[in-house]
Each structure stands twice: as C-alpha cells, then as structure tokens.
Image (cartoon, helix red, strand yellow):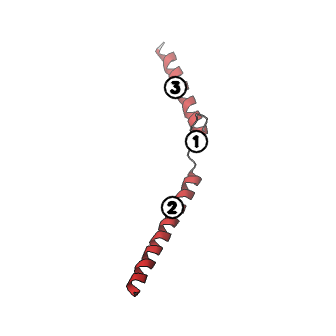
Amino acid sequence: MKQKVFIIFMLISLISLLLIACGQNGKEPDDNAEAQRKSEEEKERLRLLEREKLQRIADIKKN
C-alpha cells in the first residue's frame, strides 16, 4: 500500500515538474536568452547614465 502511494506521489510530482518546465501551468518558463538580453540592456543603460553623469561633471568643472 505504501509503495502505491509513493509511486502515485512521484508521478504527480514528475507531471507537475514537466508542466512547469513546459510552461503549461499558467506561468511563463524562464528563458535564459531573454534574461541575458535584458541584463545586457540594463548594463548598457547604466553605462549611458554613467557617461552622462561624467559629462555633466566635466561641464560643471569647465564653468
């Protein structure tokens, strides 16, 4: 009896994991390429902000 319960539990767990991996449980699966692209965009945005900040500081020092 315990073996049957354990097997059923394992099957349900595996099906749940499969659904999560496939994105069929209502959640979107994590896409590494998309996350990396967003990370690169954020890094570029921060670089631009830093460059603008340094330019403003240089302009203030000139005046």
Q: Which of the 4 image quadrants contains residue 41?
A: bottom right
Give neighbour class at mark 3: few <14, some 14-19, many 20+ (Cα, 10 Å): few
Give neighbour class at mark 2: few <14, some 14-19, many 20+ (Cα, 10 Å): few
Numbered label attached to residue 10: 3
Judged by depth in the image, the label closer to the viewer, 3 or 1, is 1
**How far across and down, in percent of the image, does residue 7 sit?**
52, 21
Left or right, 32 with reference to 52: right
| View extreme (top): residue | 1
Q: Earlier in the sequence, mark 3 or mark 1?
A: 3
Tag 3: amino acid? Met
Numbered label attached to residue 28: 1
Numbered label attached to residue 42: 2
Q: Is mark 1 on a helix, strand or loop?
A: loop
Tag 1: amino acid? Glu
Q: Residue at x 54, y 53 (%)?
A: 35
Q: Distance between the residues labelled 1 and 2?
A: 21 Å
Q: How far apart are marks 3 and 1 (CA)?
A: 24 Å
**How far across and down, in percent of the image, does residue 29 sit?**
57, 42
Q: How far apart are marks 3 and 2 (CA)?
A: 41 Å
Q: What element carries label 2?
A: helix
Tag 2: amino acid? Glu
| View extreme (left): residue | 61
